[in-house]
Image: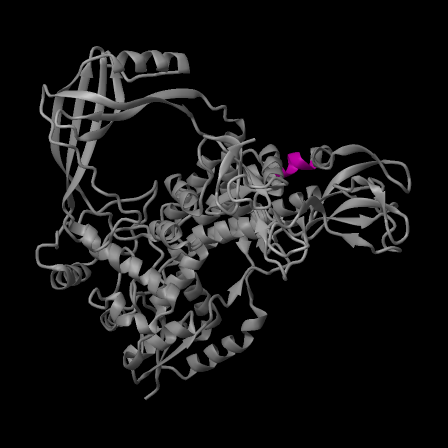
Amino acid sequence: MSESLVIVESPAKARTIGKYLGKGYKVIASVGHIRDLPKNKLGVDIENGFEPRYVNYRDKSKVIKTIKSSARSSSEIFLATDMDREGEAIAWHLSVILDDSEDKIRRVVFNEITERAISEAFGQPRDIDINKVNAQKARRVLDRLVGYLISPVIWKLFYRGLSAGRVQSVGLRLICEREDQISNFKPEEYWTIEGELASSGGTPFQVKLSRINGEKPEIRDQGESEKILKEITGLELSVSAVEKKERKRFPYPPYITSTLQRDASSRLGFSARKTMVIAQQLYEGVELGSEGSVGLISYMRTDSTRISDEAFRNGISCIREKFGPDKAGGGRKKKKSGKSVQDAHEAVRPTDSFRTPQAISAFLSRDQMSLYTLIWQRFLASLAKPAIYENTRVLIQGGVYTLSASGRKLIDSGFLDIMPDYRPSEDTVLPELKKGEKTRVKKLENIQHFTEPPPRYSESALIKTLEENGIGRPSTYASILSVIRNRKYASREGKTLMPTTLGQEVWKALSRHFTDIFEIDFTAGMEKKLDMIEEDRLEWHEVVKQYYKPLKSDLDNFEEVSEDARKEIQKETDQVCENCGRNLVVKWSRNGQFLACPGFPDCKFTKSLAEEELERKCPECGGQLRYKRGRFGRFIACSNYPDCKYTEPIKIGIKCPENDCAGDIIEKQTRKGKIFYGCSRYPDCKFASWSKPVDRKCPKCNYGIMVEKSTKKKGDFLRCPSCKHEENI
């Protein structure tokens, strides 16, 4: 009897599924997509209803040959690719190349790779969902139209190799607009009155001025704050109210794709792409010794917090056994996220809650262990009892002034025993105060503050904003962020995303010439239409047509103003070409901005944007020394290059402070373009500093230098890198 053929995307998934199916089934992997739009052509027939012209991947010829050969000798063919749109599209493409075996093809889907789920899926095969395929097809065509029609516009203005993506550009827009908000922000001064009172028994507690004549205080200057402080200090203060309330803090629901990426970023420091790569490994199967390959989590691309009855019972039983019978809460509220929740798949959860992280730690890599622990804890915590706090609020009255004190005490830890807070907070205990009780001032002070601009986006915050605005879908968040960073439109500084100069200039060009298609509401509306295609409520050709119309209009308008647009980017300077006398213009390359002759290609003169001349001459040939900029930052070089190849690093005039080191501190640059300062004798000397050194010994520990620092609260000041002593500049 011939075998049944099962086709999946990856070898790891094939191993796990093959173990459960056993004899009678042959499981092979397509290794992702086997067909797509051509790489070097548009591949979309605009005149014929935007029909895509798919081609087979050249490097998949052997895989396709194996699939076709295996299909001919199989009694039935099961397409077991992932259950999202992309997986459905892969299944459809497989069915196209297996056209002569069409009558044997069935589609199977499962939310987790377990024996039960596999058995149920193969017991209930279905046809390929053509509506889901059409939704993916529409998305692919839309992305190709933007990428192939707008990217050349960016090349004309900057340089070849850049890209403009349909959703990626909206992500860049959010990052750049936030940077504009930060740059244009004007801080406003305000003051608060805070300090310490003592109860009648002498126990101190923290208070803050919360009301003046029953209204929230708005203290705008130091004079007003000092007047209020003096008045309060001279008043008799007594407790006017003591309020105690129990508050339940309910656990979060189990993870969806976006919340998993956000928590993995904040708790583990993972990028969105890294999170999805590791989650894919956990989903497809990990070798657990004698058990073989086991799928550890459910499907990780989802926007629903729904869980199955079986998973619910399994989780509750695990909580009762591992954490005690009184910990299980039994709550199961379904919570939707974002503007458009498809609710097609379950939440991200362990396939078996009794498979604890500790029990399988020996078989997981460190990153796999960290992510699995996070998913396991979050799922079980979502089924546990709420934590209960006793909140206390005390009001102290003195004339027209009301001061308040707050306390919090944990009564029942509930779900926090399963998944503690990322940054646990300690109880704030107030003394036992009674209404009418007199208090006295121990220390009150007026504190100056300034309003702060909104923070830059972290990866997690950007994902949250994209989700809230209905931009992208669970399967696209990681790729959006990766493309933005890979194209050098934004860099990651610590945990935040900062737009590069290139990113800001690209967005300015896009916003100026493509006014419709990168609007947030327009992009979110297109995502909803893709969902409606999947629901068979819209026809995909018509949706693409609606999108193409404003795109074509913007492209036509750009052609009329392309020369002016280029001049806006490539600004003319007052520096003169040394070959032909024309004024040099600013241009872009992969290494940043530079100066070039506008007479190119007749005149090929170029010059670094930062080529200021030094007063010194080249010690080797007597030529003029200049500052130049290379791949790894600025340096000094002879103007007679390439005849003279003398170079030297940029010294800042300060000797290295390390003991027994004769090196100089020089300016350096990381691969991502961030300036830092290090010793010229590296790697023999490892001295390095992000902050600019100052030639001044520390008055406290006598260390050789101090460094410049600046914060909103302290302003500009100096700090010793060794003992951390600080002083004003």
Query: Which is the main secondary structure of the residues drawn in magenta?
Result: helix
Q: 203 or 37: nearer the eye?
A: 203
Drawn side of residue 525 relative to residue 179, left or right: left
Q: Residue at x 15, y 26 (%)?
A: 199
Is residue 108 positioned above or below 667 on the image?
below
* x then y, percent, for residue 196: 25, 26
Q: Nearer the viewer, residue 463 or 420?
A: 420
Q: Quadrant of residue 20?
A: bottom left
Residue 261 at x, y percent in the picture? 38, 52
Q: Quadrant of residue 514?
A: top right
Asked if one can make out residue 329 in the rendered structure from this viewpoint, the answer is: yes
Q: In this picture, is 675 found above or below 131?
A: above
Q: Position of residue 441 (x, y in %)?
A: 23, 21
Q: Is residue 715 magenta?
A: no
| Residue that appears at 62% across and 42% down | 502
Residue 529 visible: no
Front residue of 103/695: it is: 695
Residue at horizontal 37 percent and vertical 20 percent from the top? 191
Q: Which residues are magenta?
A: 555-559
Q: Quadrant of residue 626?
A: top right
Location of residue 310 in the rendering, given as x and y in whole percent from the top left corner: 17, 62
